[in-house]
Amino acid sequence: MAVDYDLVIIGGGSGGLVVASAAAQMNAKVALVEKDKLGGDCLWYGCVPSKSLIHAARVAYEVKHASRFGIHAETSKIDFAKANSHVQKVIATIEPHDSPERFRGLGVEVIFGSGKFIDPHTFEVDGRQLKARNFVVSTGSRPAAPPITGLQEAGYLTNEQVFSLTERPDSLAVIGAGPIGCELGQSFHRLGSQVTIISSRDQIMPKEDPEAAAVVAKQLESEGIRILRNARAEKVEIVDGKKCLWAGGEKVIVDEILMSAGRSPNVESLDLETAGVKYDKKGIKVNEALQTSNPRIYACGDVIGGYQFTHVAGYEAVVVLTNALFSPIKKWFPSKANYRVIPWATFTDPELARVGLTEEQARKRYGDDVFVLQQPFSGVDRAQAEAATAGFGKIITTEKGEILGAHLVGPSAGELIHEVVLAMANKLPVSKLTGIHIYPTLSEVNSKAALLLQKQKFAQNERLQNLLAKFFSFTRSR
């Protein structure tokens, strides 16, 4: 069957843009369909604006506490609107890289509009039918709101509205203690809001190492942020112009509510059933090649669930690109997504970064063949110099030094984790992290942690200790 395109990509977020850009530059004929604007959540409502707001809040915090270094500054006023204008300026600076003009310049046909599959081989956009050798669905996800009585009537914010605020709420309740809730909760508190974070579990950021999450929780509470643990939001009412939220048997009265309790895949309007594509509430079902139940349709990014990070969407896009674009060849030996080494970070202060297994997961899988190498930042001279000693680096290995996972909580953890990621990706033993590191740098947390494996093994080897004691006793006697 003759078709008009090599690829039709549905969704102009991180994954879709990577596929479209690379395919077009390889001279494939590509159409990119987007119902709103290119760039996706990352550019408009996620990574870019959140990290910009976090930076503004960090500056406010550092100025407020500058007296500990003998620097006395007044912090009587925080211009929230101007702080948020910094966010919009950063978005505007980055946006041209994801603009329709740039992609059209690369040879991509950019089509704006809502569409759906009308059969397994055709995607229709505003009456126009697009046929292609293969399709890529990368429509992303959206904030999910649990069924809380009165929430819709009272109104709430998500990451899609919060960065457009021009007035700071004096008080804010954050429903959800995951990365987004903790990042934005801390940022708004540092910019002057009274913040309460509602956590459905005892541990904030439950996917993280418990010790690491506890370090972040301690910092949040030390700044004055209230954390309600093991609490679920039950009901919201408007009383005297305020939002009254009942959670965990307590009443929280605030100006605004920020919802950060999960995501839902954007699949409803695509009519995937007509295309023979299977999905559920978590997202589109794909195999290791990121191919759906319709072999001509691939999917990547948030819409397939799993790791919902921009960098993972970009990685998945490369897998999709090679399989979908070169399907006549790749169907015999497809590229497969490998999630063994997936890092991520939460940009609270202190930062928290992770790759691989937790200590608990490692012990379940490897039993007694697990060594935990933990180096506190208080033992890193650069951290002492910068008064940023909270936290630690933890590397989990086997006796032979295979790195199973790593967890860093402390200054610049999101940057420092990459040394471990590189080692894991190339299957290097932990001993390779003990090489020369510039002194004094925060990266010494990795080398110091890595050295602990040999120290721990030596401490457990009484025979070797006795042998060395005898050897040195002999050499001293000569």
Image (cartoon, rainbow, N blue to C red):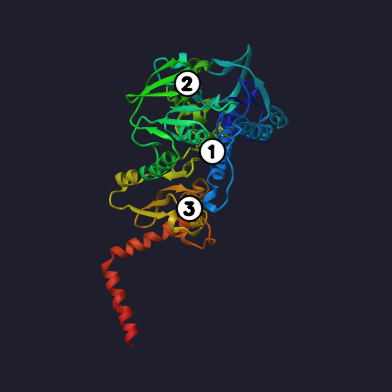
Q: Is residue 8 above or below residue 450?
A: above
Q: Amino acid at mark 2?
A: Val
**Where does residue 80 sit, x and y in percent of width and height?**
59, 31
Determine whether, in the image, residue 474 is placed left or right of residue 289: left
Instruction: Point out the image quarter for the C terminus.
Output: bottom left
Q: Position of residue 456 (x, y in %)?
A: 33, 61
Residue bearing the label numbered 1: 311
Ranked by sequence position, the earlier of labels 3 and 2 is 2
Q: Mark 1 or mark 2: which is in front?
A: 1
Per the image, the residue denoted by label 3 is 423
Inspect the image, locate mark 1, and give the three-letter code of the amino acid beneath it.
His
Crowdedness of circle 2 by 10 Å Cα count: few (<14), some, many (20+)? many
Sequence-first disc among 1 and 2: 2
Distance from disc 1 to disc 2, alpha carbons, whole Å, reads 25 Å
Disc 1 is placed on an element classified as helix
x%, y% of residue 441?
A: 53, 57
Instruction: Give the tally of numbered discs.
Output: 3
Residue 277 shows which numbered tag?
2
**Contact? badges 3 and 2 (CB < 8 Å):** no
Whether residue 461 is situated above or below residue 290 in the rendered picture: below
In front here: 49 or 360? Answer: 49
Q: From the viewer's perspective, is the residue at label 3 or at label 2 nearer?
A: 3
Give me the residue at 34% from left, 43% from top: 361
Q: Nearer the viewer, residue 74 or 325?
A: 74
At numbered mark 2, what does the secondary structure look like: helix, strand or loop? loop
Asked if residue 429 shows in the view, the reply is: no
